[in-house]
């Protein structure tokens, strides 16, 4: 019955895209019959040429003479055929100038070679390509046979006679548009390109099959996020990208300012009363280089003057480093006497690194809310593991405790993985052929098995069985997380009840005063993919934590106001969107799962 339903569905005529005259390729090659039910249909399709092959088509050099037609003859025609003299008189009298029909010569056809081009095009709607056949009589083939060209063509879908990877092809009758490519300078002219190579072209790399698959998966996950929360009674909230609230080291924040745009080029310099900032990272790198050079000079013992000069330089570098370290410990960015009164907001403002604080204000009015958008962190870690701009799903539930929010986070991840298997099966299969083949099993393990749950203390007990380099209060390393999720439990894992020093100030203090109601979700091969906590609703405990950590209380007074007026138990979690995509695609570098990666020293396009 199911096969019959599929056949009936595939027999329906193909429809054009609602907002143009073309047919989306997915509606042809993405069908269960790979387009076989559309043979004979006339369609307009568009796409970019991914592969081409030109063949010479043999043609006949001479057509055979027409077979004479036998017809009835008259008596006069019979006499003229028997008596030549009568025939000559008749011709002279009639002035005949035509030859008889049966005396026409054979028709000779010019022996010119004809060619056909087989193109395989893709319009980004699916992984599969459509084979397109263009005859040289339709257009000069050199116009359409360059890799990367865009084409819009009209033709008839035909069945491919020879067996192969393609069941149907489009016989082109009209060329409606060709977007030419500069072959010499087009960076994607090769059929197989590494992710490292195409990363230099973020404006073009989505034309490759692998990156296009990642983009489609990213799109599907975005829709699935909204569908899950809308179906479960949550409200979507737009939280601010610009904030004046800071809870982190100022070095990890991006400032929002227009001081540089003042007409006076020295406006920013005049606002900064302190000395020009020198990067500690640069100084530390210089110390390493100078130490290495000194070791080389000591071994050779050939240039004492150069050795003395290098030792003095190293001493100065150490002194400057010490000064900067002491300066960073003793004063924050606000204490550097920056005059923000002339700035746009008249106070320090930053790109948000965490939307959860603002989301709490809406949870205490709308009960269940979520937001999904970019956050910004000026991290100096390796670019393959950290982005300056990334996307985060934030969720907040009022009248909820830790167990409630852990259940919600688990259900959310299960739903997202299920939607990927359902709606992106072709993309997942393609990526598995190029990347780690077993990552499909990992996706299924999220959807099909309950997550393991242990406390931080229990996790340490497991780790102590294989290593003695663990102690209570330490942060779990990537290796620790990998062992627990990949080898010990072999499935997704939730670790909760962390030491309060390892979690943010807003996590609720437990009765032991040592731990907080917070959790991490760890998945095999990807590590921490989500984190959450029950929020501290007791204003006295929250105020105490702010004082302990030395956070700017005046900036958090609005946050404390939520506890002053109608406080309620509430909890929330976040999902690192790019980490989730890395998990479901098997891609190792975080720069390859976001359309335009921003990392330290790289903000192309």
Image: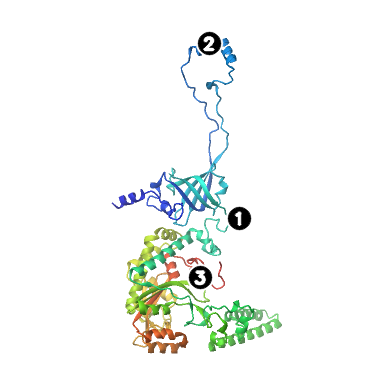
Total numbered labels: 3
Callouts 3 and 1 close, C-beta under 8 Å: no
Count neighbours of disc 2 (C-alpha within 10 A) and say few if under 14, some if 14 to 19, many if 20 or more: few
Q: Is residue 238 left or right of residue 252?
A: left
Query: Residue 341's spot in the image, x, y percent?
Result: 56, 84
Residue 219: quarter of image: bottom left
Labelled disc at residue 184:
1
Residue located farthest toward the front when viewing the structure as drawn: 94
Question: Marks 3/1: CA distance?
Answer: 30 Å
Residue at image coords 51%, 67%: 596
Residue at image coords 52%, 26%: 65
Residue at image coords 56%, 38%: 113
Q: Compared with residue 592, is residue 73 higher up or lower down, i.e. above or below?
A: above
Quadrant of the image for the C terminus? bottom right
Nearer to us in this view, 403 or 391: 391
Q: What residue does disc 3 label? A: 384
Residue 406: quarter of image: bottom left
Count neighbours of disc 1 (C-alpha within 10 A) and say few if under 14, some if 14 to 19, many if 20 or more: few
SS at badge 3: loop
Q: Is residue 39 left or right of residue 261?
A: left
Q: Nearer the viewer, mark 2 or mark 3?
A: 2
Query: Residue 280's spot in the image, x, y percent?
Result: 58, 81
Query: Residue 354's spot in the image, x, y percent?
Result: 45, 77
Residue at image coords 43%, 52%: 16
Q: Is residue 277 left or right of residue 408?
A: right
Of mark 3 and mark 1, the one earlier in the sequence is 1
Question: Marks 2/1: CA distance?
Answer: 76 Å
Q: Is residue 505 visible?
A: no
Q: How is the rendered protein coloured?
A: rainbow
Q: Compared with residue 220, is residue 358 higher up or lower down, i.e. above or below?
A: below
Q: What residue does disc 2 label? A: 82
Callouts 2 and 1 close, C-beta under 8 Å: no
């Amino acid at each position: 019955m199911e096969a019959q339903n599929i056949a009936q569905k595939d027999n329906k005529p193909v429809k054009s895209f609602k907002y143009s005259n073309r047919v989306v390729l997915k509606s042809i090659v993405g069908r269960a019959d790979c387009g076989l039910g559309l043979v004979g249909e006339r369609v307009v399709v568009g796409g970019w040429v991914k592969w081409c092959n030109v063949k010479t088509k043999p043609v006949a050099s001479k057509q055979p003479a027409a077979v004479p037609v036998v017809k009835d003859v008259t008596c006069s025609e019979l006499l003229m055929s028997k008596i030549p003299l009568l025939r000559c008189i008749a011709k002279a009298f009639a002035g005949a100038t035509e030859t008889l029909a049966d005396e026409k010569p054979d028709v000779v056809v010019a022996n010119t070679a004809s060619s056909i081009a087989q193109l395989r095009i893709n319009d980004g709607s699916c992984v599969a390509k459509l084979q397109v056949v263009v005859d040289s009589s339709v257009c000069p083939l050199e116009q359409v046979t360059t890799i990367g060209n865009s084409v819009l063509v009209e033709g008839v879908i035909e069945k491919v006679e020879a067996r192969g990877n393609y069941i149907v092809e489009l016989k082109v009758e009209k060329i409606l548009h060709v977007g030419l490519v500069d072959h010499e300078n087009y960076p994607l002219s090769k059929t197989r390109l590494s992710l490292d190579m195409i990363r230099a072209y973020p404006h073009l790399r989505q034309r490759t099959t692998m990156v296009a698959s990642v983009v489609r998966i990213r799109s599907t996950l975005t829709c699935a996020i909204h569908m899950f929360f809308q179906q479960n009674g949550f409200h979507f909230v737009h939280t601010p990208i610009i904030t004046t609230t800071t809870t982190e080291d100022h070095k990890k924040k991006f400032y929002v300012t227009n001081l540089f745009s003042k007409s006076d080029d020295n406006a920013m310099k005049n606002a900064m009363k302190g000395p020009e900032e020198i990067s500690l990272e640069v100084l530390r790198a210089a110390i390493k280089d100078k130490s290495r050079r000194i070791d080389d000079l000591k071994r050779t013992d050939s240039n004492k003057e150069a050795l003395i000069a290098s030792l003095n330089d190293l001493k100065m570098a150490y002194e400057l480093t010490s000064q900067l370290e002491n300066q960073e410990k003793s004063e924050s960015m606000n204490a550097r006497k920056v005059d923000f009164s002339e700035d746009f907001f008249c106070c320090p403002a930053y790109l948000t690194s965490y939307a959860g604080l603002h989301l709490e204000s809406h949870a205490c009015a709308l009960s269940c809310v979520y937001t999904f958008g970019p956050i910004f962190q000026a991290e100096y870690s390796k670019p393959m593991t950290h982005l300056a701009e990334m996307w985060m799903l934030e969720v907040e539930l009022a009248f909820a405790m830790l167990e409630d929010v852990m259940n919600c986070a688990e259900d959310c991840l299960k739903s997202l993985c299920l939607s990927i298997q359902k709606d992106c099966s072709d993309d997942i299969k393609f990526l598995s052929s190029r990347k780690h083949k077993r990552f499909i099993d990992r996706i299924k393990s999220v959807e099909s098995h309950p997550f393991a749950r242990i406390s931080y203390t229990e996790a340490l007990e497991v780790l102590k069985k294989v290593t003695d380099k663990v102690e209570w209060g330490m942060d779990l390393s990537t290796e620790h997380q990998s062992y627990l999720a990949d080898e010990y439990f072999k499935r997704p894992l939730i670790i909760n009840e962390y030491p309060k020093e390892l979690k943010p100030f807003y996590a609720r203090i437990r009765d032991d005063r040592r731990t907080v109601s917070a959790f991490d979700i760890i998945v095999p091969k990807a590590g921490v993919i989500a984190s959450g906590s029950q929020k501290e609703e007791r204003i006295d405990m929250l105020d105490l934590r702010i004082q302990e950590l030395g956070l700017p209380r005046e900036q958090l007074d609005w946050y404390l106001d939520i506890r002053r007026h109608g406080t309620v138990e509430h909890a929330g979690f976040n999902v690192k969107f790019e980490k989730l995509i890395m998990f479901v695609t098997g891609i190792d570098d975080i720069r390859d799962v976001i359309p335009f990666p921003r990392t330290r020293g790289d903000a192309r396009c």
